[in-house]
Amino acid sequence: MATAVAGPEIERLIQLLARLPGLGPRSARRAALHLIKKREALMTPLSAALQVAIDKIQVCKTCGNIDTQNPCTVCTDPRRDPSIIVVVADVADLWALERAGATRGKYHVLGGVLSPLDGVGPKDLNLARLAERVREEGVREVILAVNATVDGQTTAHYITDLLQEANVKVTRLAHGVPVGGELDYLDEGTLSAAMRQRTLF
Ligand SMILES: [Zn+2]
């Protein structure tokens, strides 16, 4: 075990920062030192912002998004098209699609994907509420924007079955060549999916 270079309070700060995604012990030390040096300009406002977030953050009862209001900002935005629901596994995916400005539809956050190996079943996900929304909100299209992994696709199939009786179009994101991608670098699965899902030029 390495010798501590600072008091327990600072060591604790470093240990907590090191648990953040993308921060190893080394960058956690750097981040802690940066915070300590910028105590007034950064550390104090960060601490206050964390406390406000702790007090105000809630899970949206309608869509499962995380926000400081309930229903969330997305659900209450009148400019969104209520006839389209984009289904995502996680809030991070919702944020990614919003950054891309990819859709003006509403969202539904599942809170994960089905994973028999990890013991995640339908009851562990926000699925019942999705079926309810499709029935009650006049939804015409459900877009499955889940990962192109085995678990993601299992989840997509499950939702397609779940909504079979509902009068709704179920679509999924295209699989294929990424924008700026080079064919030579793509794996065979991606290439053959791109070939199958080719579109008119
Ligand atoms: Zn919401």
Image (spheres, rainbow, N blue to C red):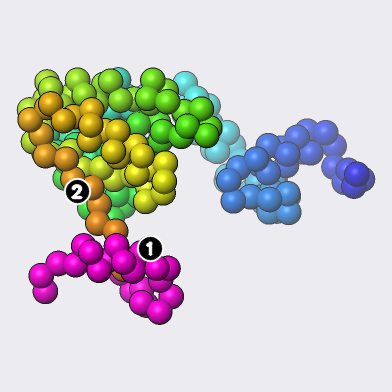
Amino acid type at circle 1 is Gly
Q: Position of residue 68 (x, y in %)?
A: 36, 27
Q: Is residue 117 above or below residue 55?
A: below
In-front residue for pair 37/4: 4
What residue do we see at 42% from left, 41% from top?
Answer: 151
Circle nearer the N terminus (2, 1): 2
Relative placement, left or right, of 66 versus 6 is left
- Horizontal side of 166 relative to 176 (left or right) equals left
Separation of disc 2 and disc 1 at Cα?
Answer: 26 Å
Q: Closest to the observer: 180 or 13?
A: 180
In the image, what residue occupies the spot 75% across and 35% down? 12
Question: Can see residue 142?
Answer: yes
User: Residue under circle 2?
Assistant: 103
44 drawn magenta:
no
Percent position of residue 166, x then y: 11, 27
User: Helix, strand, or loop for circle 1?
Assistant: helix
**Residue on which the image places disc 1:** 189
Q: Residues within 10 Å of mark 2 (few under 14, many from 20)?
A: some
How many discs appear? 2
Which residue is painted at 33% across and 69% down in the image? 191
Quadrant occupied by the C terminus = bottom left
Judge whether residue 193 is colored magenta.
Answer: yes
Residue range in magenta is: 179-201
Residue 139 image-quadrant placement: top left
Q: Is residue 151 above or below residue 111?
A: below
Q: Is residue 174 left or right of residue 191?
A: left
